Image (cartoon, rainbow, N blue to C red):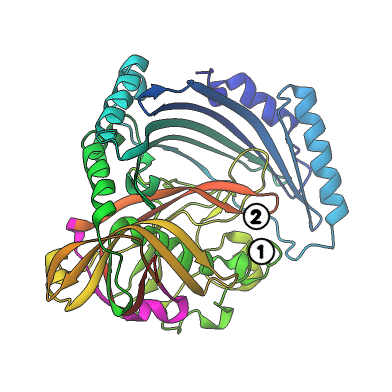
Amino acid sequence: MTDLLIESQTFEDRLRTVLPTDVDYASARLVDERTEHLSVRRNQMEPVFSEFDTGVMITIWDGGGLGYSATTDLSEAGLTTAVERARYWAGITSGAMVTTAAPTNHPVGTYVSPVEVTWDTLPLNDRIELLQQQSRLLGIDDRIVNWGASLVRRDVDQLIVTSSKDGDSGRIEQRFRFVYPSLRATANEGINTQTRTFGGHAYCGQGGAEVLGRFGFGDAASRVANEALELLTAPNCPTGVMDALLAPDQMILQIHESIGHPLELDRILGDERNYAGTSFVTPEMFGSYQYGSDLLDVTFDPTVPGQLASYAFDDDGTPAERQHLIQDGILVRGLGGAASQARSGLPGVANSRADNWNRPPIDRMANLNVEPGDSTVDELIASIERGVYLHTNNSWSIDDSRNKFQFGCEYGQRIEDGEIVGAVRNPGYRGISSTFWRSLSGVADRDSFTVMGTPNCGKGELNQMIGTGHASPACLFSNIEVFGGEE
């Protein structure tokens, strides 16, 4: 691993030397990223590779204009050139911006991912042997035709320094440690092919080697393989209107697509129209709209220890705190950072985020969670006369206003008269976001509450790929249109 630039006082002094003090507001955001990829496929070790990426984004607000410039040239000359380019663009955009107010705060603070067992205490040979062991547990039957296990470790260190002509300055240091484990088994018999994964790659989070134990990585391979085989002989999912119990690893996709994206304020304001679409949510809905049943409580919570998108400050330097977005089913707050809040006049959160040093921050989901209820999972199952228990997303389709959707899952279990009676294959369901959440009829308690994430949410032009955190218990929805893959 490289030396950490955020620990170099010389480099920080260099940033402060070039950052102007004669403008309304200036910031320099250093991102130093190091990633290791390990993978075993069909019991064969694939090449180990590492990535290193470091750069600085200079941002200048001045005279009602805003300018960005990013560089990997970290010399004083390179940083000075980036500052001059950002000044140039701030001058060009002066008087042409949708919002013109520069930030006024100069935050100071730190954040460090909670790490119990540092990754390097697990030697490379041990990490490889763990993957080979999991691969052997996945490839247990001739009908399993493809399988693999992988681990990705990603360290991201960020330093933001700010200055302005009023003489104030700020400093934010944040150190993120991410772990992304993955398991996958594909079984085939005749024309029937079924795949099971380790939570659809959602069992990821911040921390060290303990993240693997947190999600039961070492014990999951046999279950993944056996469920892939089980699906080969399982009947197709029934079709009809029935109850749908969504497991936490399916709830994260439901939250992400039909709450998270629709509530992004920049999307509501039209910024994403040309690329990722708009939203069925309008500004007038905040404060009164019945988004879901009164069982639905959704929070933006960047304070959850170990969740994928926990942090202390967003990339504009806004302090991050827990906020309700939906409370007792009522829409109360959007997912928008300081700029979108100023434009819309609506309450938002600290979620202005960039995926790297060469992208400006935009409104992004972070940790978006459905709060647990009072029922046990067994009680929810017992309440179902006819329904399906749906696990692990494997396909998604949603219209460009984030309203009408259709999702498929890897694994289903049919429920009859309050009991699980067997597995079903190719389960799917469809609905409309603006009414779907009102059918929420049961929310499981904290015993099923699982903290997960999606590592690859794409948005923005130029595209930004970023991790989002989602946590949820199992949730029951009544009278849902369910279908099988052979519908």
Q: Is residue 18 visible?
A: yes
Q: Name the residue rendered at 38%, 39% in the picture.
A: 206
Q: Position of residue 397 (x, y in %)?
A: 51, 65
In-front residue for pair 167/301: 301
**Number of residues whose C-alpha sits closer than 10 Å to that of mark 2, classed few (under 14), some (14–19) or many (20 or more):** some
Q: Residue furthest front?
A: 190
- Seen at 30% across and 36% down, the residue is 211
Up/down of 93 relative to 189, above or below:
below
| Res. 304 in view | no
The residue that label 2 is drawn on is 460
Point 70% across, 53% down: residue? 461
Q: Secondary structure at mark 2?
A: loop
Q: Is residue 378 left or right of residue 252?
A: left
Q: Is residue 74 left or right of residue 258?
A: right
Amino acid carrying label 2: it is: Gly
Residue contact at pointers 1 and 2, CB within 8 angstroms: yes
Residue 435 in magenta? yes
Residue at which label 1 appears: 272
- Residue 390: x and y in percent read 29, 63
Magenta part of the chain: 430-447
User: From the viewer's perspective, is residue 72 above or below residue 100?
Assistant: above
Residue 124 lies in the magenta-colored region? no
Residue 4: x %, y % from top left? 53, 22
